[in-house]
Image (spheres, grey):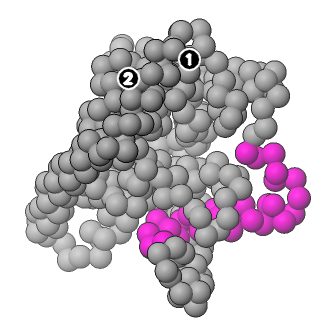
Amino acid sequence: TAVRSAPDPGALLGIQHDVAFYRPVALLLFAGEHALFGLRAGLYLLFNALLHGAIALAGFRLLRRLGVEPSAALLAAGLFLVGVAHLDKQVTWACTSGGLLAVLLVLVALLAEADPRRGGAGTAALAALLAPFAHELGLLLVPLLLLRRALGAGPITARPRGWGAALLALGVVPWAVSALLLGSAGADTTAGGLGSPAAVLAAALRYVGYFGLAVLPVPATGGGVPAALSRALLGAQWALGAGVVLACARLLAARTARPGLRFLAGWALLAVLPYAAIPLPARWLELRYLYFAALPLTALAATLLLRLGAPGGWRRGLAAGIAVAMVLGSLGLALVIERRNDAAARSPENLAQRAAMEANAVR
């Protein structure tokens, strides 16, 4: 809709006043997709699937760079690749490529910043500058860089003196630009309602609820769920979420734990924090908001799972087999989704809507 209503490049760099977001990179990306794919939904979803696969690959490389065992990193990447919970609308909506691109850019920046080769510095700087303008998730790059440096989980200190400070300063630029533009537009932010104690408590409950939803991704309401069962599911999700938050906090504070695992715990805690400020009812939490937290959570879970087993080479074989099965399953799921969307695109209702939208675009 934004592309059709703003065909000129200048308008594409404006603010989406209805949601108070500033995503010029995402809008330009979507404009390019629209020029290439038109209104064929399957191609948008295929592009999203390719971005998602690239994120899984970059995530695997980053996990290995953080010292995660190969079998655990492979299992985590496989779980992330086909996670039914965090995929949700984040990958299966045609208009979400900007958020996927932001996540990929954050991972690229974290990888390139630790790359000793000469090109790593420029790649990290470019990714750090573009990621926040693709999606607000990119703003988490600066806290993640600071956290990694504080924990000693990355070789940022191996760069020439001043490089770390320069990269962090560059990452702050999008924060300042977004704040100035949104402030000048008079946009209302979703975090504006956190002034009262009741709102803070509601945000804390949402925060815990998201972690519970990651462990138990079962909708607590809708679909004719009885009230008693709904309350039981919500209670279970909150209890599980509180356990995950406490476990991550303890791991982050454990000085004897490996820096890479401590960084993953802090990453998971940071990734969910912005979405807790979105004033959604506790019963309507969005699974797609777990996308950025899914990789560190699955990595921690895979590490714990493989440590529970007896030592031996069978663990690596099992992890590799599960990952391969998940990859094949994800390809099958992508084909099913594409067929359903193509069938829906050929329905009389959609054809009529498409004709009306094309007519509006021409006018």
Q: How many marks?
A: 2
**Foreground of the two, 307 or 255:** 307
Q: CA distance from mark 2 to mark 1?
A: 12 Å
- Say whether residue 63 is magenta: no
Residue 92 placement (x, y as % from top left):
36, 47
Residue 338 placement (x, y as % from top left):
23, 45
**Residue interval drawn in magenta:** 190-219
Specify whether 214 is left or right of 21: left
**Residue 72 seen in the figure:** yes
Residue 142 picture quarter: top right
**Foreground of the two, 237 or 112:** 237
Q: Which residue is mark 2?
A: 34
**Foreground of the two, 222 or 71:** 222
- Of the numbered discs 2 and 1, the one sitting upstream in the chain is 1
Task: Please identify the dominant SS of the magenta region.
Answer: helix
**Foreground of the two, 55 or 246:** 55
Kindly indicate whether the residue at mark 1 contacts the one at mark 2 (C-beta within 8 angstroms): no
Instruction: Report the amino acid beneath label 1.
Output: Ala
Residue at (53%, 9%) from the top-left corner? 9
Residue at (79%, 38%) from the top-left corner? 188
Identify the secondary structure beneath mark 1.
loop
Specify whether 253 is left or right of 310: right
- Is residue 279 placed above or below 358 in the rendered structure? below
Numbered tag placed on residue 6 in the rendering: 1
Residue 306 picture quarter: bottom left
Instruction: Report the amino acid beneath label 2.
Output: His
- Is residue 95 placed above or below 159 in the rendered structure? below
Numbered tag placed on residue 219 in the rendering: none
**Residue 303 seen in the figure:** no
Residue 181 placement (x, y as % from top left):
74, 21
